[in-house]
Image (cartoon, rainbow, N blue to C red):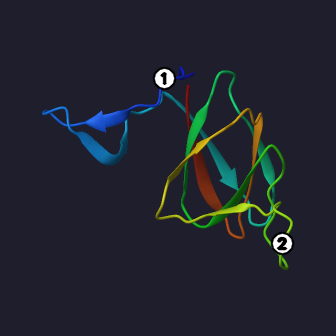
Amino acid sequence: MGALKALRLASDANQKTIDGAVVAGGWVDCRLLAAGVAEVHNVPAGAKFVLISVTGNAYINFGTAAAVPAADVTNGSASILMVNTLPRIFELKGAATIGVIAEAIQSVTFEFFK
């Protein structure tokens, strides 16, 4: 089992930070999603940030189940679209779970930092 590490930007040999690069967090979980099946992932204790990567497009929601939109959602509760070409870092702000769903079979990784 991995241990949580602090979120830090990676730097080169001259100590210049590398845009978008972070030092690996040590705690990485993976979910293999079935098409159209929502899953809820538990956030490890002490985690404050998560870097999420997907192999296709997926929807995520913090603190509740995610949903693929079937109509307009205009009350602030829509799930966030994750695109496979763009891993994203989120501050968890106390969320104990991350909901995730995709319309096709794919993998989602969660890399947690303290």
- Secondary structure at numbered mark 2: loop
Instruction: Identify the amino acid type marked 2.
Output: Val
Q: Identify the residue at horizontal 19%, vertical 32% (top origin).
A: 15
Locate the C terminus and report the quarter of the image it occupies.
top right
- Extreme residue toward the bottom, this view: 71
Q: Identify the residue at horizontal 83%, vertical 60% (top origin).
A: 77
Of residue 36 and residue 88, the one placed in the foreground of this image is: 88
What mark, if any, has residue 97 been given in the picture? none
Q: Identify the residue at horizontal 79%, vertical 45% (top origin).
A: 40
Instruction: Identify the amino acid type marked 1.
Output: Lys
Of residue 19 and residue 54, the one placed in the foreground of this image is: 19
Mark 2 is surrounded, within 10 Å at the Cα level, by few (under 14), some (14 to 19) or many (20 or more) other residues, namely few
Residue behind mark 1: 5
Mark 1 is surrounded, within 10 Å at the Cα level, by few (under 14), some (14 to 19) or many (20 or more) other residues, namely some
Q: Are marks 1 and 2 in contact (CB under 8 Å)?
A: no
- Extreme residue toward the left, this view: 14
Q: Identify the residue at horizontal 46%, vertical 64% (top origin).
A: 85
81 versus 72 height, above or below: above
Name the spot of residue 55 as percent of width and height, x first.
54, 61
Name the spot of residue 64 as percent of width and height, x first.
84, 47
Name the spot of residue 36 as percent of width and height, x first.
79, 66
Q: CA distance from mark 1 to mark 2?
A: 36 Å
Left or right: 7 with respect to 46?
left
What mark, if any, has residue 73 been given in the picture? 2
Of residue 6 and residue 37, the one placed in the foreground of this image is: 6
Name the spot of residue 69 as percent of width and height, x first.
80, 72
- Secondary structure at numbered mark 1: loop
